[in-house]
Image (cartoon, rainbow, N blue to C red):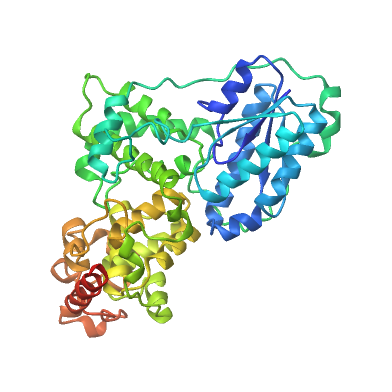
Amino acid sequence: MILVWFRRDLRTLDHTALKAALDTGQPVVACFVATPEQWQEHHMAPMQADLIARRLEHVHQELTELNIPLLYKEVPRFDDCTKVICDWADKLNATAAMVNINYEVNEVELDRKVSQALDNRGVEFHAFHDKCVHAPTTVLNKQGEYFKVFTPFKRAWLQKFSLPTVSKPQRQNELPSAQLAAVKQDAFDADFTFSYPRESSKAWCASTNDILKQLRTFARERSDGYQMKRDFPAIDGTSQLSPYLAIGALSPRQCIARLYAENPQPDLSEGKATWLSEIIWREFYQHLLVFEPKLVKGRGFIDWEDKIQWSYDEQAFECWKTGSTGYPIVDAAMRQLNQTGWMHNRLRMIVASFLAKDLHIDWRWGEEYFMSKLVDGDFAANNGGWQWSASTGCDGQPYFRIFNPISQGEKFDSDGQFVRHWVPEIKSVPNKFVHKPWTWEGFSLLEYHKPMVDHKVEREITLRLFKSAKE
């Protein structure tokens, strides 16, 4: 008997550990352990928790069709998982447990403890690289070191690349009930306990068929225009598949295989190539966690980051969180996040830059807030994005590059369609003034506030702060 432990890999298609288990020919049992207190410490968004809970029901259905039982238990923390996995292994007389690797520090330590405890029982523990197309430590420079700049990383990544094959699990013979009697009480059912706070994720599909349909539709109909449309938040120009990658309902291999399947030419179109580049960015940040675990411990990548004099103004932070800064593009973006659990990628860069470089607030506050709200919250991607915007990260933008919230709005939402939707207070403002409504003659009649800070003034302060820290 082999136990396959599902975590943030909630799918049966292209699941490396599940395939490996089935390939042995031994009976397979799947399991999932919910850890609400640990998730709380990791600031999991209630909307993502809801998506995970919904997704579990669909994974259970798929496993049932494969004659693979799913065991489920909720315990407070990762520390409690070891006993649960070992108990299941004992009761099933399992010879091995198999997992897909997560690269964050707590997760790595969890696997170490579980592996050791199982080894003491004579049970093998097999961990597989599944989250990335190329596993960390396999994309290195000529000196055998990890890449600290994305462009050469991408070049090396592409040199190793071959079109991925998406694996489909084979149905196993139905297991005799006697083999499962000892774990019958832990069988997953519709009334499973899931005590983590939940916020409706109904705007996001949870079934495999619906998720794959969304992937196919994007790859076939919209990926060619991705490069041209992806920066405009009022346009449906992105894939919006990030929530499924974050919880492992989709693998990057599935995404890439479908992208090429919908490409009639040997070479990808510019739009498709740009989307592929975004997947490679995702892998760049995953790899960094392995080489620089300090990133998971709240540290900046650059050595002098801890010398930056950040502000910890809670009132200013509250204005940013609630979308009350007086800059329409920032306020619209934050309101989109608060109401939908998702934010357009261009806007993530804009609001992150505003927090770190206009308000001078510690980027870690923003990083944590994003994780607490995002349905697509993924530590590596979120940390990488925030450190890029704050100019503290690996291959981050130069500290003197500071997004102007007015010009960013004018460039990427020129007619104000997006900001008017999320900031209805400015619906009557003419296009010419919609991203700087305080300059409009009718501003006093609006129920909208003036900018909380002067961007030009704050820009100069940021330059001084970063220059001082760097010296």
Q: Is residue 345 above or below residue 444?
A: above
Q: Residue furthest front?
A: 143
Quarter of image, res 256: top left
Nearer-the-camera pick, 201 or 452: 452
Residue 386, relative to residue 60: is it above or below? below
* Rendered image quadrant of residue 177: top right
Indicate left or right for 363 with 436 as reference: right
- Identified at 50% across, 26% down, the residue is 14
Q: Farthest residue in the left direction?
A: 432
Residue at 30%, 46% (x, y): give it.
236
**Observer-nearest of 124 and 59:** 124
Give the total of numbered labels: 0
Please identify the quarter of the rendering in which residue 39 is found: bottom right
Determine whether, in the image, residue 347 is placed left or right of residue 178: left
Residue 397 location (% of width, % of height): 23, 56
Q: Residue at x 30, y 62 (%)?
A: 390
Whether residue 421 can be seen here: no
Q: Give how far across and how far down residue 186 sits, in percent.
A: 78, 39
Tell me: residue 48, above or below residue 183.
below
Q: Please tell me which residue is depicted at 75% across the width and 28% down the height of the picture.
A: 122
Which quadrant of the rendered structure holds the C terminus?
bottom left
Q: Is residue 183 left or right of residue 348?
A: right
Left of 28 or right of it: where is 11?
Answer: left
* The residue positioned farthest toward the bottom in the image shown: 444
Image coords of residue 389 (percent x, y):
29, 59
- As drawn, 418 above or below 249: below
